[in-house]
Image (tube, rainbow, N blue to C red):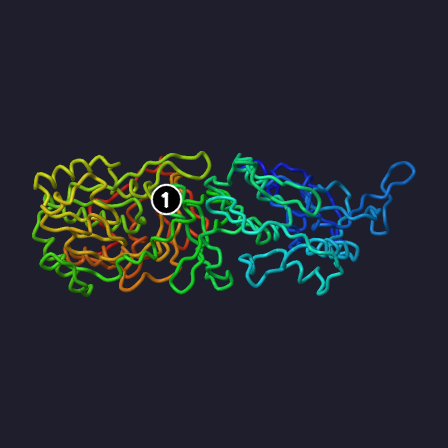
Amino acid sequence: MNPFNHDIAAPETPLVNVNFNGKWIQVPKGANVVEVTREQDEFLPHYCYHPKLSISGNCRMCLFEMGTPKMDAKRQPVMGADGKPEIAWIPKPQIGCATQVTEGMGIRTNSPLAEECRKGVMEFLLINHPLDCPICDQAGECKLQEYSSEYGTNTSRFVEEKVKKPKLFDLGRNIMLDDERCILCTRCIRFAKEVMDDDVLGIVNRGSHNTVTCHPNKRFDNNYSLNTVDICPVGALTSKDFRFKMRVWFLKETNSICTSCGTGCNVTVGSREGVVYRLTPRENEEVNSLWMCDAGRLNIHYLHDEKRFSRPLARVSGDLFESGWDDVLGQASRRLKAFSGGQIAVVASARMTNEELFLAKLWIDELKVSLYDVVPRAGKADGFLRSADLNPNSSGARLLGVSKEGKDLPAIRDAVKSGAIKALIVLHEDAAEIGLTPEDLKKLDLIVFVGLIPNATTQAAHFILPAAGFAEKRGSMINVNGRLQRLNPAHQPPGEALEDWEILRDLRSQTTGGNGIGSVEDVFHAMAGQISVLSGLCLGRIGDMGVPLDLEAKAPKRESSPAGVAAS
């Protein structure tokens, strides 16, 4: 993803012998001491070091005691009683992030000298820090707070007046900077310059008056700026969207994926009591490393739109009325059965999961519908993580046979306009996007809409079936690189909304018969039985990191008669 992968040693890297806290171990040559300590399941505290950024060595928190092999007069290592080289310890501590291991090196990360020096660093860092933990948004995730409990003191020897730095500096459209909390680790500066090639941040002034700021007449407005909030070790950089909304320790964290484009960045969904408060990137070197774009991160508020559908609706005498699921599903199915397959069209969505698309295709085939497709969404790739395909599951829609790459959409539009299509099923889309006007929709005898938010289609729909959002359901998607990944529910859908696979199962059951499905795992099992590239997989085996699929080598094989999903 970027050249600064300090934590990943190349396979061919030779090993060297080092004395780590009294025991001899072998580690890859050239690894830095922070990495070596992590490999030994211990921890060397640090602020400025980040495995994906260049090494700056300016926080001085990762101090350790270092030694080299003791040499005799002939420049040969002096061997101890244990047959190992004796170590000559350097009296001055070194920084672990910028020190690479060499043969025979001695490392003491927990010596009295190292710990005393770290306490000195903490005392220095806390001189001017405001210690406004009760209101700081980083509380609960603040490294300064965590390390101060181990290396800090409960008193201060500082008697001078504290330096007051700028507060509430508007750094960019998504970022607020509290310079008074900044410890000048420069992670944000290095991220902007090295990862985003947006060299817009820097440090101005001297000594204790140093501050991070934007270059004159510039703003920190690139589409990945919120990643600096994640890597800021203190509360200096905060997200305007998340700021002061929720304490992080109240959030339930759920591993899932972003559905804002075809990349499918791995994310952690932070939610509480049915509300998603934030998405943060989850490390997956095969997909998004440690990063994600701001657009995907902030694309969560529609889940809590006040106009979102939470109960099934049926249109009576021109008006929509709330009704029960049994009544709405029964009415919709009875009216749908009055039409032949040639009079029905389906506009599906590549925002749906594989399981939902699989059931949709089964239903389409059983209804003998010939006009169906998904709505393509093309954008502009940014060369980093943002994909040109703005649908999260175009690969799944193609694999499962629901997508015709948008080729059927003009035919659907023309057939509705001409009156050849009498019934339209719209799944998580808006018929206006394929060129159908409100007047066109009024010609239809039946419109069944499955989705979340009102749009032009719902204004004419006869039945509106409220569905779950991406953070409320379990299922799988395939990203643009052919990686099968899993969605996990962070909370329940609002009101009486159901997951799409449940809605499609019930509609199919009442119109064409057959279900045999009790869970979304059953749907995946049936799908894996028919799609060869998914054979042997299940939602549990996908795991949190996903599974690569060889989509080109293994063409999808759909059996002539659906198996695995029993017909009643």
Residue 39 makes an appearance in the image: no
Quarter holding the C terminus is bottom left
The percent position of residue 534, horizontal first and vertical second, equals 35, 46
Residue 549 quadrant: top left
Whether residue 390 sits left or right of residue 347 in the image: it is right
Left-right relation of 331 to 542: left
Q: Residues within 10 Å of mark 1 (few under 14, many from 20)?
A: many
Tell me the quarter of the picture where residue 271 sits: bottom left
Write the residue at 90% across / 40% down.
Answer: 72
* Position of residue 455 measured from the top left corner of the image (x, y, whole percent): 23, 49
Q: How many marks?
A: 1
Determine the residue positioned at 24% across, 37% down: 404
Residue 527 is situated, as x and y percent measured from the top left of the image, at 29, 50
> 180 left or right of 398?
right
Residue 441's spot in the image, x, y percent?
13, 46
Q: Residue at x 34, y 53 (%)?
A: 302
| Residue 126 seen from this side | yes
| Residue hosting label 1 | 478
- Looking at the image, residue 529 sits to the left or right of residue 176; the answer is left
Vertical comparison of 317 with 15: above or below: below
Which is more toward the observer, 236 or 462? 236
- Amino acid type indicated by mark 1: Ile
Whether 376 is drawn above or below 280: the answer is above
Q: Nearer the viewer, residue 56 or 106?
A: 56
Classify mark 1: helix, strand or loop: strand
As drawn, the residue found furthest toward the right would be 73
Front residue of 35/176: it is 176
